[in-house]
């Protein structure tokens, strides 16, 4: 019993120390603050993009659009921040949430602050939507990006319910009010409705990429069949501007803003101690592999699962 108390006490102390390291101004945060001539703001988008606030957990990080938009607003209003680097490591997520973040990026540019998207391991689907709003996109040659497309998945659990003896009684105001319910298959009319939604959001996605990348709609549509590309392939196709790492993206942002090298940086994304601990656990050595992709846009699915 005594050993358990000691272990619990050590855990509390560790979390407290990490909290101080991450949250106290100017401590444990290399690069915080700005230089006399200005600085480059850093905003990280790491995890599945969703609405609401960002959070971390055992099932993976969630990037909340509300949190990221607020960080970008702070960068926009900070007179010392002359440019921003978006560090992306995300498989995508909600269409509307991605649109909100992309619009905040556009507001930064309209305010006269260059934005450089720096792609890490993965910047696909909704994350690419966000990246396409930046002035420049820098990707590692092995980055997984693209996945320009939209998907809705509906689970049909009727046979399972029958085996378990579950009888679902539905009272609805209209024929399509329970559309997408897991206790029955979709009707042909409902499939058409969902397809129309997918087509409409897909058109918005393609238009956003075409406008952001300076490409025609036809050029983007030719590449937007849902497939993913490596950073090097994306560079050859015009989806990425240059190949390089985070440091080179930072240098490019400084150059666009007329800042001296190396630029001072100001980090707007502050991870919680719990997120930091999880990131260390999840970063243990592993064999070379492709990232586990999440579905592009989960409009109806009750939980996030990897696409097959």
Image: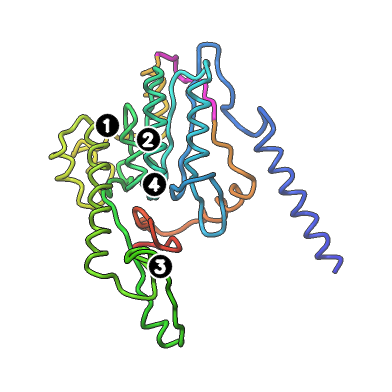
- Mark number, residue 172: 3
Examine the rendered structure and indicate whether residue 300 appears above or below residue 134. Answer: below
Q: Quadrant of the C terminus?
A: bottom left
Residue 48 coordinates in the image, percent (x, y): 44, 50
Residue that mark 4 sits on:
121
Examine the rendered structure and indicate whether residue 283 appears above or below residue 259. Answer: below
Would you identify the image quadrant in which residue 171 lies? bottom left
Residue that mark 2 sits on:
102
Residue 250 coordinates in the image, percent (x, y): 42, 27
Mark 4 Cα-neighbour bin, 10 Å: few <14, some 14–19, many ≥20: many
Q: Which of labels 3 and 1 is toward the front?
A: 3
- Mark number, residue 212: 1
- Give the spatial CA distance, label 4 vs label 2: 20 Å
Q: Which residues are magenta?
A: 258-267
| In contact (CB < 8 Å): disc 2 and disc 1 | yes
Which is more toward the observer, 245 or 96?
A: 96
- Disc 2 is placed on an element classified as helix
Looking at the image, is mark 4 or mark 3 earlier in the sequence? 4
| Residue 188 placement, left or right of 275 | left
Total labels: the figure holds 4
């Amino acid at each position: 019993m005594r050993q358990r108390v000691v272990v619990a006490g050590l855990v509390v102390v560790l979390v407290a120390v990490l909290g101080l390291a991450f949250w106290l101004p100017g401590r444990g945060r290399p690069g915080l603050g700005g230089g006399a001539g200005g600085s480059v703001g850093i905003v990280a988008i790491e995890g599945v993009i969703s609405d609401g606030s960002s959070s971390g957990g055992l099932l993976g990080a969630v990037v909340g659009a509300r949190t990221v938009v607020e960080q970008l607003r702070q960068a926009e209003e900070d007179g010392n921040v002359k440019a921003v680097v978006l560090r992306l490591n995300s498989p995508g997520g909600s269409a509307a949430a991605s649109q909100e973040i992309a619009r905040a990026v556009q507001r930064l540019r309209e305010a006269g602050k260059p934005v450089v998207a720096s792609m890490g391991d993965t910047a696909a689907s909704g994350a690419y939507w966000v990246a396409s709003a930046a002035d420049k996109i820098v990707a590692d040659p092995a980055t997984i990006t693209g996945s320009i497309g939209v998907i809705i998945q509906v689970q049909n659990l009727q046979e399972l319910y029958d085996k378990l003896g579950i009888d679902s009684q539905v009272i609805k105001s209209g024929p399509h009010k329970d559309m997408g319910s897991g206790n029955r298959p979709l009707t042909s009319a409902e499939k058409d409705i969902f397809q129309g939604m997918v087509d409409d959001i897909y058109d918005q996605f393609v238009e956003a990429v075409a406008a952001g990348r300076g490409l025609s709609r036809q050029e983007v549509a030719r590449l937007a069949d849902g497939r993913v590309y490596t950073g090097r392939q994306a560079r050859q196709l015009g989806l990425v501007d240059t190949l390089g790492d985070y440091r080179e993206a930072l240098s490019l942002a400084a150059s666009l803003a007329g800042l001296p090298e190396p630029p001072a940086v100001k980090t707007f994304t502050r991870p919680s101690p719990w997120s930091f601990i999880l990131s260390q656990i999840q970063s243990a050595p592993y064999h070379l592999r492709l990232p586990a992709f999440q579905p592009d846009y989960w409009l109806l699915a009750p939980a996030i699962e990897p696409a097959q």
